[in-house]
Image (cartoon, grey):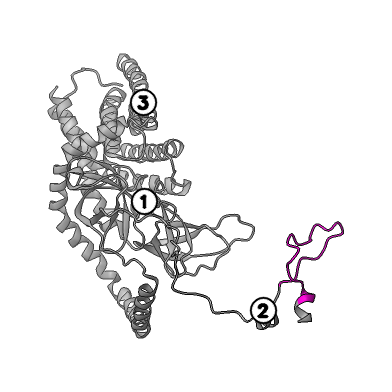
Amino acid sequence: MFQRRRARILLAVSVVVVLVLVTVDFRSEAGGDDLGGRLRNGVSVVLGPVQDGLSTLVRPIANAAGNVGELFSIRAENARLRAQLAQVEERRLSYDDVVRENEELRAQLDFRQRNELETVSAHVTAQGASNFEWTATIDVGTDDGIRPDMPVTDGDGLVGRVIATASNSSRVLLSIDPNFGASVRIAETGVIGSLQGDGNEPMIFEPLITDVEIEVGQEIVTSAYQGGTFVSGIPVGVVTSAEVEDGQLSRTVDVLPYVNFSTLDIVSVVLTEPAAPDEPLELDPSPSFSPPPVDPQRSEAEVPTIPPPVDDADGAGESTEPDAPTPTDGQDT
Amino acid sequence: MARALVIGLLLVIAALVEVSLLPVLTVSGFTPDLLLLLVIAFALDDGALTGVRVALPAGLLTDLLSSTTPLGLSALVYLGVGYGVGAARPYLAPESLTAPTLFAGAGTFLGVGGYGILSALLARASASALLVAEAALVATVYAILLAPGAFALTRYVDRHFPVEVPSTSG
């Protein structure tokens, strides 16, 4: 009985302490002084080397276990890859032509060539301690030039972004975490939208304009649109479902990420800053191109004219430009 | 004092195993909650007082290894589970393995589910209800499978580093 009473008192005191901690952390984060972040960075500094050692020790065993598990799916994957190879062979014929055309167009537009991204390689040493957050710890930190918000990639595509840094380690918010959001576009069509993680479910893409055609199989890449934090063009995933529901104001599209988050090992942190987003084209004050002289008679005869709106009873639909041509003008000539 | 150090070391090792080793052996992307399982095992072994005593550091350790939820959220959940399971201990048959194992599963389900709901209330973006239920179910299965090992470990600690308070009737 006495022990149960002590347990209740200890529980009450502990709950009060924890609630104070939650409140202080919440308020300090909102106020810019991230108490929780500093404490977590301290733990990362201390435990980072141990996690690194453990990860190095267990990685070969885990890879071997994974290989055994994959034996069962190899036959099906082989058939799938053969089918994909046949498709790629078909597409390869037009690829060279597309590349040449792309080079010519870039030269004509004086388009900025894509720079090689400056990256730092890192090992994933640990993953999040909770089943409701998809984070990873990597073994590079501020000493290696890592800063928050830098994108993290691997050979397959976008892994996530750095959310906290210590001197020798960093924490990465994986792109499948519900807290993750990014500006992306469809590679083929350029349709821009936002992407959000959804845990172990496919990621959710919301196009900025809902009334666009989106097809299954289209590739999603990062976009620097409106100050996106990522450099443009990092592959993210592929559209797996693009159903349209009538009467919906927003449209959501399922995206399967390229990255296999259960086997993350070596990743790259992109140090390159994103280019200034969507800078307006600078007009040349003395353009070399000048329009050809216009034959007034020919232009009047051939250029179609736009009919004015039908006049309302009160005359509200009248043109504001009194000299604008009317259909009658065009027909008379 | 030695018991506190041993339990503390055990919690740190469990946390390291949870974040470094288990993610490569996941089922459906979910990992076992080893620290919560240890809290439940100690609470079933020694009662509510030990449950609360172990729950606070275990929860804070989980919070420090997390990134997106407020500090103290796991501790709050672990305290509730540690006390609740410890308070139910006197009603379980002392030699039974089935009942404590089922309690470990139920405690894990409530703990993981409760954490999911609280993080949905406090985090910026939340996991869906389906995801919370899925994670809680997978963690429960893990807990039931790992519970006998966790009980053996806590009994070993109890045997070699007994509780200083003589009565453990809860």
> Which residue has dot 2 on it?
A303
Seen at 35% across and 74% down, the residue is: A107
Query: Are the residues tagged 3 and 2 within 8 Å (C-beta)?
Result: no
Numbered disc 1: what chain? A
Residue A192 visible? The answer is yes
Quarter of the image holding residue A286? bottom left
> Which residue has dot 1 on it?
A229
* Residue type, label 1: Thr
* Residue, far top: A2
Numbered disc 2: what chain? A
Residue B40 visible? The answer is no
**Dot 3: within a 10 Å radius of its alpha carbon, few (fewer than 14), some, or many (20 or more) residues?**
some
* Residue, far right: A313
Write the start and end of the magenta stretch as one range: A306-329
* Residue type, label 2: Val
Query: Are the residues tagged 1 and 3 within 8 Å (C-beta)?
Result: no
Which-is-in-front pick, marks 2 and 1? 2
Quarter of the image holding residue B162? top left
Please give left or right for residue A236 compared with residue B12 in the image: right
Numbered disc 3: what chain? A
**SS state under label 2:** loop
Seen at 45% across and 64% down, the residue is: A285
Instruction: State yes or no: residue A57 in magenta.
Output: no
Which-is-in-front pick, marks 1 and 3? 1
> Which residue has dot 3 on it?
A24
